[in-house]
Amino acid sequence: MIHGNGPVLLTPGPLTTSAATREAMLYDWGSWDEAFNRMTKSICRDLLAIVSGHDDFVCVPMQGSGTFAVEAALGSLVPHDAVVLVPNNGAYCARMLKILERLGIAAVELKFHDDEPASVARIQAMFERDPRITHVAQVHLETSAGLLNPLDEIAALCAQHGKRLIVDAMSSFGALPIDVSKGGIDALISASGKCLEGVPGMGFVIVRRSLLEASAGIARSLALDIHDQYAYMLKTTQWRFTPPTHVVAALRAALDQFFAEGGQPERGTRYRSNCAALIDGMTALGFEPYLDADVQAPVIVTFHAPRDTSYDFKRFYEAVRDAGYVLYPGKLTDVETFRVGCIGAIDADDIRGAVAAIGRALQTLNVSVAT
């Protein structure tokens, strides 16, 4: 085990954090303090480095959860006369559509099944069918099922057709390779409480510098205006409004551990090991993963719920929680499922412990998993 006391959170966030990350929150920072502002700057520099942002991109931190940052990016970077294509294969794609609707931005939905990756061919066909489309808002890893969408191919397509691409990389940033220097991606959004293994409370937008500098006055919100946040930080080194100081300090500690572990390649390797241990163990218990292996991301795995009439998720959840492991309900509408995360400051031994706890819970509740 690489975490401290408390339950193991097998969820897509908040995650189980390390003792060092939690300890970083024991110090009180002043929001105007020079040392705190240097910390913010160092975090932004490191976040850019993870995706090869270099000189062409900037990182803008935002107060709030990942959804705050998604809404900030869409509301600040998409012009009022734009039309946004959203390939939709899950709950977080649907949330982007809802955000666009609330912001009064024209959107086109391209619907896929919950277990079907976004198709580059169908996106291209939409470009040809509807020349009004100016932007694509794409979820990289749809955590409602754990589905991985083909980001590199979609980015190349958008570059070829001159479409702006805004990517929700909430559950993939730090775990999977992303390289914005290849072209095609104009903005990338994630948050502190996901695969970087910080705590929730800070989102961030990595955005092409030229696009951000041209976006003054677009934002539909005062608090969620990333251009103003960027301009104010550039001028003063400070956040516009009260920053989540303890969250920022925890992220600094989490990033130090991220790089000490070996960065994205090694973080991804640990998560893949966790995912393999999870699927092997759950399959041995009789559970069936919802997704095919070739589209399953090593971040969270959706399993079909037992069909036994004795099964009740709430009782099942509580039994596993009493053993020290926190599961997550499913977000699919067509079949009953539940989800088990592979991320956070955990390793394969923690996963095997969770699988054993799940097995004991099934016995206690007299639930059969036989399909």
Image (cartoon, helix red, strand yellow):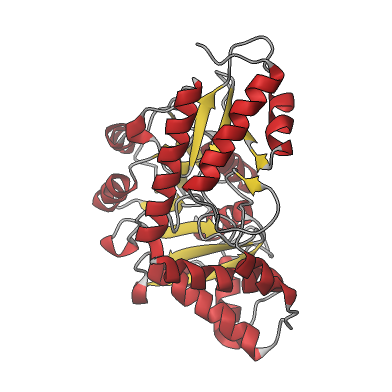
In the image, is 32 to the left or to the right of 208?
right
Considering every residue shown, the one lying at the far left of the view is 160
| Location of residue 127 in the rendering, given as x and y in whole percent from the top left corner | 32, 38
Where is 338 relative to 6, above or below? above
Q: Quadrant of residue 185?
A: bottom left
| Location of residue 295 in the rendering, given as x and y in whole percent from the top left corner | 36, 34
Where is 228 relative to 71, above or below? below
| Location of residue 36 in the rendering, given as x and y in whole percent from the top left corner | 64, 83
Where is 33 relative to 268, above or below? below
Q: Quadrant of residue 296?
A: top left
Residue 168 visible? The answer is yes
Q: Quadrant of residue 353?
A: top right
Residue drawn at point x = 74 percent, y = 37 percent: 322
In the image, is 355 to the left or to the right of 160?
right
Residue drawn at point x = 73 percent, y = 79 percent: 27
| Location of residue 285 in the rendering, given as x and y in whole percent from the top left corner | 51, 23
Q: How many marks?
A: 0
Q: Quadrant of the N terminus?
A: bottom right
Q: Toward the viewer: 216 or 97?
A: 97
In the image, is 161 to the left or to the right of 220?
left
Residue 289 visible? The answer is no
Where is 265 relative to 146, above or below? below
In the image, is 150 to the left or to the right of 17?
left
